[in-house]
Amino acid sequence: MARYVDGFLIPIKKKDLNGYKKMAKLGCKVWMEHGALEYYECVGDELDNKWGLPFSKLCKLKPNETVIFAFIVYKSKAHAAQVNKKVHSDPRMQPENFKSMPFDMKRFSTGKFKALVQA
């Protein structure tokens, strides 16, 4: 069955990872409760690969920063829309609960993807 994915790249200061992890755990709980198939929040480990454009350059990371690579998997585009509608109306995910973000929203990047190959 085809899958649909919401993807995120988030440059973040290393000192803010604990705050981000707390927020990510809540996000995971909420998305999974509302029907997401899989939820991943991954922190950069080896970013200066010799092949292609390294994430560190792509994200213009400073020495005190790393990047979060996150993605949420759904059954289909329609399923993603249903899940996200529920998530965005969930009281736990309202803006007033996130007075300060542990990353710069101006450098946050997101996209929606159709699965091309899967196993």
Image (spheres, grey):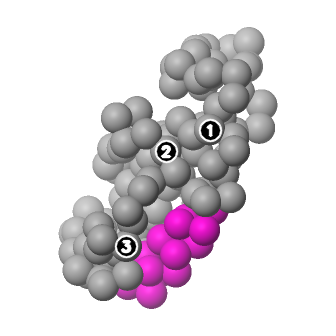
Q: Residue tagged by mark 3?
A: 97
Q: Is residue 29 magenta?
A: yes
11 to the left or right of 104: right
Tell me which label, 2 or 3, sits earlier in the chain: 3
- Identify which amino acid the numbered label 1 is placed on: Lys
Q: Which residues are magenta?
A: 21-35
Q: Mark 2 falls on what kind of element?
A: loop
Query: Where residue 103 is drawn, which disc sits there?
Result: 2
Can residue 12 be seen?
yes
> From what the image shows, is residue 44 above or below residue 94?
above
Whether residue 58 is situated above or below residue 25 in the rendered picture: above
Magenta region, main secondary structure: helix
User: What distance separates the C-alpha of mark 1 from that of mark 2?
Assistant: 7 Å
- State whether residue 38 appears in this view: no
Q: Are marks 1 and 2 in contact (CB under 8 Å)?
A: yes
Residue type, numbered disc 2: Phe
Q: Nearer the viewer, residue 76 or 35?
A: 35
Judge left or right: residue 34 versus residue 88: right
Residue at screen point 43% across, 49% down: 7
- Whole-percent x and y of residue 13? 62, 38
Q: Amino acid at mark 3?
A: Asn
Question: Would you call the spot at circle 3 few (<14 residues within 10 Å), some (14-19), or many (20 or more)?
Answer: few
Comes first in the chain, label 1 or label 2: 1
| Distance (Cα) linking label 2 and label 3 | 15 Å
Residue shown at 29%/67% (left/top)? 95
Which of disc 3 and disc 1 is earlier in sequence? 1
Give the quarter of the figure containing the N terminus.
bottom left
